[in-house]
Image (cartoon, helix red, strand yellow):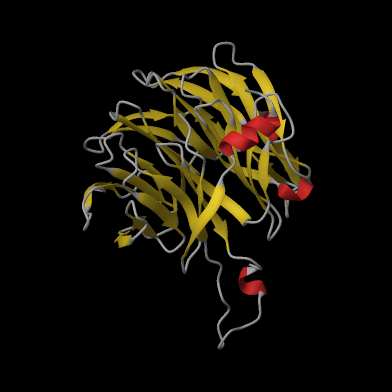
Amino acid sequence: MNDPKQLLQKYQPKEVKQLKLDRQMCIVRFSPDGKLLVAGGQDAQIRRWDEQLNELPALTGHGGWVQTLAFHPSSERLFSADSWGKLICWSAAEKEAKPLWTAEQAHDGWIRGLAVSADGKHLATCGMDRKVRLWSAEDGKKLHELTGHADDVLAVAFHPDGKSVVSGDLKGIVKQWDVASGKPVREFDAKVLHRLDRLQDTGGARCLAFDKEGKVLACAGTQPKNGGNVQGVPTILLFDWQTGKVQHTLKHGADGDAYVYDVHFHPAGFLMAVSSGNPGVGKFYFQQPGEAPPFFVTPKMANCHSLAVHPNGNRLVVSATNAGSNGNGRGPNKDNYPGNWSPLVVWDMPKTE
């Protein structure tokens, strides 16, 4: 089915609810069994909701921003990492969840990406220290330290077969590593997502995702035109896994729309993405590989930073930013400058067979 009107009729999501929080959320994810929704924020907490979206006690134990989260395939454990370099494994299925193990200094500084293998045995992390590390998901033992990136590493993802992990850095270099040996295998060229402007490196391979069969690797970010207040069109590169070559380059938006911040493959093969650009600019859209423009797009949410996909494929949650947000650029409220916060916007898609 490639007709945009038919795709829109079959898959168009509808906004059904907003969860209004008091802090900015960096990432939002569903558990594999769909019973938990979690969000990591700039307040060093992990917020949780049950299937009916009733809020559960928050998880506390981080010291910095919680920007990356990943569930174990069993849904019983949750892994989280922060901007201070701490990695925690939680007993996520319990109402009063507690840490099962902690790596206090998993990385030297900000952990930017975290992923769990499909068999639940391995955990991968990456960060501002230019390192990729593989861990035992069971006990937190470090298995391999993968060195070779010359710049900050921003994203990691496991191939569905569990034999390989990929990592993307600030310069747009995506490396494939062998999980068993920790050795590099090859590189994918996503340098189009990077620009050096006025001594500032801008862009990078911001997020990575595989389709369900592991035949296509999506690498997303922006094609930056300048540094500072970045101008660039949100861009997704689709690599053929077998050849390592770019099959399609998907762009959507104007220069001010900037980055794709999160991307997922729908089982039907199209991509679901969110983007964030200049203050107040955000997009949520569905796009077919090799076809433009997106068959669904909404600009109603400001600065979208994460997209959670329910395992049944019928519910989506977007972590956005409150309207009119300028942080400390806004006027004082009772002698305080109001900070930004994240509405989590819940969307339901039509049920399909």
Q: Would residue 225 appear left or right of 336 to someone viewing this image?
A: right
Residue 75, how many percent across, how many down?
28, 40
Residue 266, how many percent across, how many down?
52, 31
Q: Is residue 146 visible?
A: yes
Seen at 70% across and 27% down, the residue is 249
Residue 328, how many percent across, how many down?
62, 73
Seen at 61% across and 83% down, the residue is 332
Q: Is residue 189 visible?
A: no
In which quadrant is the C terminus drawn? top left
Q: Would residue 317 appear left or right of 289 to someone viewing this image?
A: left
Q: Would residue 38 appear left or right of 280 to someone viewing this image?
A: left
Most extreme residue toward the bottom is: 334
Task: Using the image, determine if residue 158 lies above or below residue 97.
Answer: above
Residue 30 lies in quadrant: top left
Residue 340 lies in quadrant: bottom right
Residue 247 lies in quadrant: top right
Most foreground residue, 131 or 31: 31
Seen at 37% across and 57% down, the residue is 53
Most extreme residue toward the top is: 243
In which quadrant is the N terminus drawn? top right
Q: How many marks?
A: 0
Most foreground residue, 84 or 4: 4
Task: Using the image, determine if residue 299 lies above or below residue 194.
Answer: below
